[in-house]
Image (tube, rainbow, N blue to C red):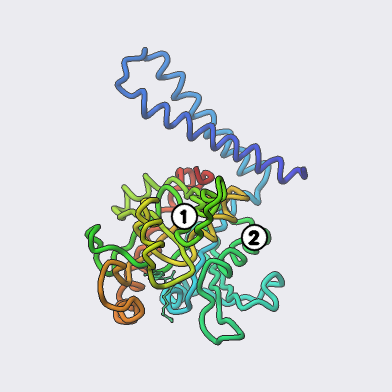
Amino acid sequence: MSNKHTISEIRHQLSLLLASYQTVNEEIEGAGITDDAKSLLRNSNLNLNQLLDDLDMNISPSLKNRKVFIQFAMRIEAEPVLNRLNAKQIYPEWSKGLPFLIYEAHFETLDLVIGIAGVDPKHDVDSIGSVPAAVLAQLAIANLGPKLIINAGTCGGFQSKDHQIGDVMIGTDYVAFHHRRINIPKMDEYGVGKYPVCDSSQLRKTLELKSGIVTTGDALDCSKEDEAFIKANGGTLKEMEGAGIGWVCSLSKTPLLPLKTVTDFVDHPADTAEQFFANYKVSVEHLTKDLVRVLQYLSANPKDQVWIRSV
Ligand code: SAH
């Protein structure tokens, strides 16, 4: 292991430890333990925080640079935010020969790289779906080492869950596949995936954002079988990329934050594509506004749980 990797691993372990201290701290509040024990815990917390700061500031200055990769599937989902962030297109070596569109921007204390799946050269449409999404996310992880990936985009919601068109929701718990039906012991669970996402509880509370569970399949429609999988796994935000990205994030333990806006209802008789085109403009406007709020929060809260690996 190189020095740089050792340092990031130590930093990573420290942040996990800090997170568990914080949880313990919250849990013992009012639990009738002595003041001495409470202050011991508080001090451990402070010391760990100090240690993390020292590591960031002195030992490895590169860790100060908080790189966030924001990933979209479609150009129309990303365009308003690219304008808002004054992002510039770049042509990195690692995306050569691939359809991916890559941009960079600086936002407060964050270094942002924005990736869009881009136009499929054979079919001349956006490369939506879980395969391009996983390839793009993995290339970004391997070449940029982002501290967080935000998967931003559109999704189908459910009227039965009181969703509204234009709602912006954070994906919590995990991202799962709903179309990988493999009726073999253990492979059935592999098919569903259930890759963890980051702990966004504080962020959601502060920004008053709604939440749901992202469920991914490579079809826009929803077959009876898909519907059964979605129900069985608690999915509420149906889209086509999240779990592909979740898989590669889980391999490298990169925190993943899904941020999705509702463009259509899965449980509505109208055609999904028609709903999508009627609604995407307004939904993407809302997504852009909330993405900027999320970035402001992330910039101001370098020690938030979001930065700690997905659990
Ligand atoms: N049919 C349109 C729009 C594609 S919608 C077109 O041809 O351009 C598919 C994209 O929006 C995917 O990237 C997916 O993640 C998201 N999406 C929105 N609503 C969806 C739904 N109900 N089911 C699956 N994906 C949905």
Furthest toward the right, the residue is 2
- What amino acid type should be assigned to the residue bearing mark 1? Ala
Callout 1: SS: strand
Quarter holding residue 57: top right
* Tag 1 residue: 176
Question: Viewed as shown, does residue 152 lie left or right of 248?
Answer: left
Indicate the position of residue 267 as horizontal and vertical percent values: 27, 66
Question: Viewed as shown, does residue 125 lie left or right of 121?
Answer: left
Q: Which of the numbered marks, if any, corresponds to residue 138? A: none
C-alpha span from label 1 to label 2: 25 Å
Q: Residue at x 65, y 48 (%)?
A: 61
* Tag 2 residue: 144
**Closer to the camera: disc 1 or disc 2?**
1
Callout 2: SS: helix
Residue 202, above or below 248: above
Indicate the position of residue 18 as horizontal and vertical percent values: 51, 33
Question: Viewed as shown, does residue 24 lie left or right of 71?
Answer: left
Q: On the rendered image, what quadrant is the N terminus found in? A: top right
Q: Earlier in the sequence, mark 1 or mark 2?
A: 2
Nearer to us in this view, 251 or 151: 251
Residue 147, above or below 84: above
Q: Residue at x 22, y 59 (%)?
A: 162
Quarter of the rendered image showing ligand 1: bottom left
